[in-house]
Image (cartoon, rainbow, N blue to C red):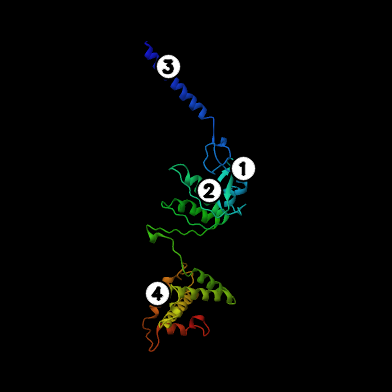
C-alpha cells in the first residue's frame, strides 16, 4: 500500500470520526436548554420562551374531562381557546386562553391538526357553551361533532351546503312568532306572549316589504308600503294562530311560503259580490282581533 492510499484512508477515517462526534454532541441539547433571554442562545430580537410563571398567568388550567362534560357534570365556566395541555392520559389539563384572540393552526398533512387540535377545541367550545361556525369542506365535522353537539350539549346545529344549497338545513322565519302564539293559545290570559307574537310579525312583514328600511315612511308610495306590511302582518298572525300542528298534520306548516301562498289564494275571486276572499276571512275574526286592525 503506497503512501497516497494511506493518506486517503486517514482522511476518510478522520472525516467519519468528525461526523460521528457532531451527531453525538448535537443530540445532547434540546429546546428546554435555550435560556429565557431576549437575545442570544439561538433566539432573535425580543423573542423568548415563556416562563412557567407567565404560562400560569396567561392560561387557565382547566381539567379536560369530556366524559363528565357530556354527562352534564363539571362543565367549564371559562370560555376560550385550548392552545396546549399538560399531564398524561386520563389526567389532561387544558391550557385555555380566555382572551379575545385569533389563532392560526398550520401543519403538514397527518400531523394531527384535526384530531389533536380542532376536535379538543370543539369539545371545549360545546362544553363551555359558546356559539361557533365551522367551515368544513369534507363534511367530517358536521357528521362527527355536529352529532356530539346535539346529543350531549343540546346545540341546534344548522348545516349550510354551498355545493348543493337544497340539501342545507332550513330555517323557519316564523319560528319565534309561532312559539309566542302557541303560548298565547295555551293560555288566553298570557297577553304578553300574544303581544310579542304581534310585534315580531310586524317586524318580519316590514323587513320583507322594505328590506333596506325607510321607503315605507316617505314618498308617494308610503301608503302602499304600509298597506302591504299590514296585509302580511295579518296573514302571518292568522297562520300562527289557526294553523298549528295537529294530530292529522303533525308537521309544521306555518312557514313564510305558506304566508305568500295564502296571500295569493285570498286575492282570487270570492264568489260574493263586492267582497274579496280576504274580506270574507276578516269578517270571521273577532272584532278586536289584531289582524283586523
Mark 2, Cα crowd under 10 Å, few <14 / some 14-19 / many 20+, is some
Could you tell me residue 181's position as x and y percent? 53, 73
User: Is the C-beta separation of discs 4 and 3 under 8 Å?
Assistant: no
Q: Residue at x 62, y 48 (%)?
A: 57
CA gap, disc 2 and disc 4:
46 Å
| Left or right of residue 219: residue 39 | right
- Looking at the image, the residue that sits furthest to the bottom is 274
Residue 81 image label: none
Q: Height in image: 219 above or below 103?
A: below
Could you tell me residue 163's position as x and y percent? 37, 57
Q: Residue 277 or 92: which is nearer the viewer?
A: 92
Q: Height in image: 146 above or below 269?
A: above
User: Is the C-beta separation of discs 3 and 1 under 8 Å?
Assistant: no
Sequence-wise, the earlier of marks 3 and 2 is 3
Sequence-wise, the earlier of marks 4 and 3 is 3
On the image, numbered disc 3 is attached to which residue? Answer: 10
Residue 120 image label: 2
- Looking at the image, the residue that sits furthest to the top is 1
Query: Which quadrant of the figure has residue 264?
Result: bottom left
On the image, numbered disc 1 is attached to which residue? Answer: 52
Say which element carries label 2. helix
Q: Residue at x 55, y 76 (%)?
A: 195
Could you tell me residue 63's position as x and y percent? 61, 47
On the image, numbered disc 4 is attached to which residue? Answer: 261
| Left or right of residue 140: residue 186 | right
Sequence-wise, the earlier of marks 3 and 1 is 3
CA gap, disc 2 and disc 1:
23 Å
Amino acid at each position: 500500500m503506497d503512501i497516497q492510499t494511506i493518506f486517503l484512508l486517514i482522511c476518510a477515517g478522520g472525516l467519519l470520526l468528525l461526523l460521528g462526534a457532531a451527531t453525538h454532541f448535537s443530540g445532547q441539547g434540546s429546546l428546554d436548554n435555550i435560556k429565557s433571554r431576549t437575545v442570544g442562545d439561538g433566539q432573535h430580537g425580543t423573542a423568548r420562551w415563556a416562563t412557567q410563571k407567565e404560562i400560569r398567568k396567561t392560561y387557565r388550567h382547566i381539567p379536560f374531562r369530556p366524559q363528565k362534560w357530556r354527562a352534564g357534570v363539571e362543565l367549564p365556566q371559562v370560555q376560550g381557546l385550548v392552545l396546549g395541555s399538560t399531564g398524561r392520559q386520563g389526567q389532561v389539563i387544558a391550557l385555555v386562553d380566555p382572551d379575545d384572540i385569533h389563532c392560526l393552526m398550520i401543519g403538514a398533512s397527518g400531523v394531527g391538526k384535526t384530531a389533536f387540535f380542532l376536535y379538543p377545541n370543539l369539545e371545549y367550545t360545546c362544553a363551555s357553551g359558546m356559539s361557533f361556525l365551522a367551515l368544513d369542506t369534507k363534511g367530517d365535522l358536521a357528521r362527527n361533532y355536529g352529532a356530539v353537539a346535539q346529543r350531549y350539549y343540546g346545540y341546534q346545529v344548522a348545516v349550510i351546503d354551498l355545493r348543493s344549497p337544497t340539501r342545507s338545513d332550513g330555517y323557519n322565519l316564523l319560528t319565534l312568532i309561532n312559539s309566542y302564539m302557541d303560548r298565547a293559545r295555551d293560555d288566553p290570559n298570557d297577553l304578553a306572549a300574544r303581544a310579542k307574537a304581534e310585534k315580531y310579525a310586524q317586524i318580519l312583514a316590514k323587513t320583507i316589504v322594505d328590506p333596506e328600511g325607510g321607503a315605507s315612511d316617505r314618498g308617494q308610495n308610503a301608503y302602499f308600503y304600509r298597506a302591504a306590511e299590514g296585509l302580511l302582518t295579518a296573514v302571518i298572525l292568522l297562520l300562527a294562530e289557526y294553523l298549528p300542528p295537529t294530530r292529522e298534520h303533525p308537521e309544521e306548516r306555518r312557514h313564510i311560503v305558506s304566508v305568500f301562498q295564502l296571500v295569493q289564494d285570498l286575492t282570487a275571486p270570492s264568489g260574493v259580490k263586492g267582497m274579496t276572499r280576504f274580506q270574507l276571512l276578516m269578517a270571521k275574526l273577532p272584532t278586536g282581533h289584531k289582524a283586523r286592525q
